[in-house]
Image: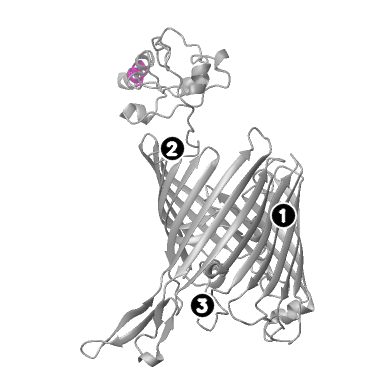
Amino acid sequence: MKAPVSILVHPLAWICLLGALPGRSLAQGPEEAGGAAPTPARPAPKNPATSTAASTPRAAATPRTRATPAPRPTPRTRATPAPRATGSTPGTNPAPLARPAAPAAPPRTLPSPSWRTGFGFGSYGRIGVSTDTQGGPGRQLNLAVHGPRLGEGPYLELDLYYRMRPYRDVRLQTVVTLAFNEQLFHFNGDWSSALALRNLYLEGLDLFVRGLSVWVGSRMYRGDDIYLLDFWPLDNLNTVGGGVSYRFGRTSLAWHLGVNRLRDQYQYQEVPVPGLNNTSEIVVLLNRQRMITSLKAEHEMGGHDGKLGAKLKLYGEYHFLPAGTLDAHLPEDEQEHLRADHGWLAGLQLGLWGFGPRSHANLFVRYAQGLAAYGELAIPFGLAADKRAKNAREVLIALSANFELRRWFGVQLGAYARYFKDADPNKYDWDDGWEYVAVLRPHLFLHKLFALALELSYQARDPAGLSPWTHRAETPGVAKLAVMPLLTFGKGTYGRPQFRLIYMLIYQNDSARMSYNPEDPRRMIKLGHYIGVGAEWWFNSTYR
């Protein structure tokens, strides 16, 4: 019976002995026991003049070994040093000896607290299920190029980051974003899924001088958006290339150069040709890379300590497509020589923020000509006789805004007016003309987790030519009214994650219905219904 007693007594004696050792604690983590890097120091107390390290519970909860030097205080803590005890307190570092005061260093912009080395993960996603009350899925029924986003199909982005600090003032990060569209196995029973690599780039920040950044890779290169329309009205490029930016004070400059090569017969052509030993092989005869370069400058004013802030952004793009030969394997009289093409875009953004909690407003104006009028990933249509887009043009005016009262009310707004003319010489063309979109979404916050939102939208087109189906002048228009009870986990109108119950009433005028092909069932819908449930989230996401 003595053996069990000794088994209990000996460990208790060792525990008491270790607990009595000065400067040690049984609460230390594996970093201290194994000699790895110490846990980063926690933020200083709000009032260091009235608290000491010995009386602060947080300091005792993160002990350090004697061999670990104390972190150097920031300029703020040097100005108001916390009093230290002259002796050694268990779980804290001994007080340093007094030194001569060092000369004041210039203020430095410290990295964002969200910057942490190592692996990181983020995501944007939306998913839902709906019905049109006729046995089919709910329909959006949009006329405009960028209609209201409510009712969009499932979509997912997974952001993977690795961040490191190879030197004291240099930061590096790799960004990989995988995107999946709405092909869901549980919906269609198909194992295949459409996957896109939206980001794959390396970025270096604060290289050589503070504020200088460089990136290389494949990237969604964007600015501010109109959330309700899922639309970036000014700077929105998907490019493979690189760029450099420099921020000094409240001004930033950024330049980028990239390329793309769409699988379109006027940019890329591969054909089978005879090979050796009665075989065939595939050769690339046309491979025209479109070069895209952009330059933007932004300056911010005010916006500190809850005051009104403003910013001005100037933006420009240039697109160039080299010459090439279509059907180069055919006799010369059957070949088609494609001339070089180009386009450009210029734009302006005016922004305000700080006129309410989480409130902002942005006005966008842009003019585009040639290739830039279609967009960097769009295949140009309505070309001139020489297969060039140089005569196409676009004018866009857009507005995005959000206003909130502190606790109970918020409203989002998105709108734009766009004029587009393709490159063909036709003066009266159904593809040309104006389009208008406006959407308003007020929120009533009834509880910290529950809100009621309404969404009212209207979109219309004013084509320059006659309808190809009715051979009359038509002005299609669509109006929508949606009611959405929300379970939201975050503050304000942009609080996410969010559960939604949606009922949407859709009205199409006769011109809108006649704009569809005669075989399209949407021609028969004058008053449509959309009922669904959905969810949306974003966290640590590159763009939302």
Q: Position of residue 117 (x, y in %)?
A: 41, 40
Q: Amino acid at mark 2?
A: Arg
| For residue 63, above or below residue 513 | above
Cα gap from disc 3 to disc 1, whole angstroms: 37 Å
Disc 1 residue crowd, few under 14, some 14–19, many 20+, Cα 10 Å: many
Q: Nearer the viewer, residue 324 or 42?
A: 324
| For residue 190, above or below residue 518 | above
Task: Quickly name the residue at label 1.
Answer: 413
> What residue is drawn where x is 73% and y is 46%?
403
Specify the label residue 388 is tagged with: 3
- Give the quarter of the figure containing the N terminus: top left
> What residue is drawn where x is 46% and y is 68%?
320
Say if the magenta span includes residue 11.
Answer: yes
Tags 1 and 2 touching, CB below 8 Å: no
Q: Nearer the viewer, residue 370 or 130?
A: 370
Q: Nearer the viewer, mark 3 or mark 1?
A: 3
Circle 1 sits in a helix, a strand or a loop, which is it? strand
Circle 2 sits in a helix, a strand or a loop, which is it? loop
Q: Amino acid at mark 1?
A: Leu
Residue stretch rendered in magenta on the structure: 8-14
Disc 2 residue crowd, few under 14, some 14–19, many 20+, Cα 10 Å: some
Task: Quickly name the residue at label 2.
Answer: 210
Image quadrant assignment for residue 291:
bottom left
Disc 3 residue crowd, few under 14, some 14–19, many 20+, Cα 10 Å: many
Secondary structure mainly formed by the magenta segment: helix
Image quadrant assignment for residue 197:
bottom left
